[in-house]
Amino acid sequence: MLEIIADFYKVEIDSISNRDIGQKNSNPIRKSAMYICQQLGGFSLKEISSRFGLTHIGSVSFATTTVRKEMKNNKVFQRKMNRLKKHIIEKVN
């Protein structure tokens, strides 16, 4: 699934799967990928945290909550996330 997300955003998969240390290194694509893994992939917080190199499931929960809030408050972002979901579904089927 990460390959499809990287293709959609036109970025290297490592920029999504590898983490940057520190709160200032916010990566909205990475957070979106975690959200998609949870929503479309049905992965648990523990599975996502392992795949993204995180030590606490709370980090995943925080990231996915951030994406949900942004989708609620930002219609442009919401449309982009919907296009991403559609893109993934099309690639998988």
Image (tube, grey):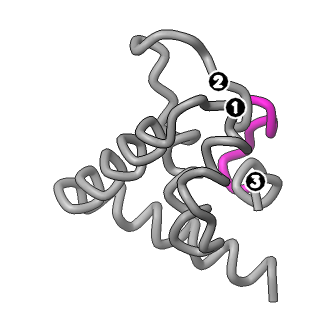
Residue on which disc 2 sits: 19
Q: Is residue 56 left or right of residue 53?
A: left
Residue at (60% x, 73% y) in the render: 42
> The residue under label 2 is which amino acid type?
Arg
Residue at (45% x, 24% y) in the render: 26
Dividing the picture into quadrants, the one containing residue 38 is bottom right
Residue on which disc 3 sits: 2
Residue at (61% x, 62% y) in the render: 37
Q: Mark 1 touching mark 2, by CB under 8 A?
A: yes
Residue 13 painted magenta: yes
> The residue under label 3 is which amino acid type?
Leu
Residue on which disc 1 sits: 53
Residue at (80% x, 31% y) in the render: 14
> CA–CA distance between discs 1 and 2?
7 Å
Look at the image and give the residue range highlighted in magenta. Answer: 8-15
Point out which mark residue 14 bears: none
Question: Percent x, y for residue 70?
Answer: 27, 50
Which secondary structure lies at badge 1? Answer: loop
Q: Quadrant of the N terminus?
A: bottom right
Crowd class of label 2 (few under 14; some 14 to 19; many from 20; radius 10 Å): some
Residue 58 painted magenta: no
First in residue order: circle 2 vs circle 3: 3
